[in-house]
Amino acid sequence: MSSHNPLTQLRRLDTTSPTFHDQVCNILYGEEYTRWMSDSQGKDLLGLVNYLDNVRRCVSLFHSPLNLQ
């Protein structure tokens, strides 16, 4: 995999960085990613899905009961 491969770029990111989400978005919405996706198959796509699955954030929404009084 070349260093310009978006999957390689994603794997090099610091997942603890406060700008991690922005960095991921920049890669996934970039031109290199679009070109890479059109040529990718099999292991590359599985690698991307596994990576995104491992770094996703589960967001819990704060839920408070409504006070109807």
Image (cartoon, rainbow, N blue to C red):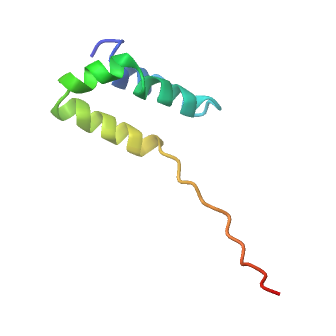
Quarter of the rendering containing residue 8? top left
Quarter of the rendering containing residue 60? bottom right
Quarter of the rendering containing residue 48? top left
Task: Indicate left or right for 20 with 10 as reference.
Answer: right
Percent position of residue 65, x then y = 71, 78
Q: Is residue 34 above or below residue 50?
A: above
Percent position of residue 66, x then y = 74, 78
Outermost residue to the bottom: 69
In the image, 21 versus 67, the foreground residue is 67
In the image, what residue occupies the spot 37% across and 17% down?
31
Q: State which quarter of the image contains the N terminus.
A: top left
In the image, 18 versus 68, the foreground residue is 68
In the image, what residue occupies the spot 20% across and 32% down?
43
Percent position of residue 23, x then y = 53, 26
Outermost residue to the front: 69
Q: Is residue 22 above or below residue 63?
A: above
Q: Is residue 12 above or below residue 67?
A: above
Percent position of residue 2, x then y = 30, 12
In the image, 65 versus 18, the foreground residue is 65
Task: Indicate left or right for 20 with 31 as reference.
Answer: right
In the image, what residue occupies the spot 62% across and 30% down?
17
In the image, 11 versus 29, the foreground residue is 29
Q: Is residue 32 above or below residue 13?
A: above
Outermost residue to the right: 69
Task: Indicate left or right for 17 with 33 as reference.
Answer: right
Q: How many numbered badges does the structure rendering display?
A: 0
Q: State which quarter of the image contains the C terminus.
A: bottom right
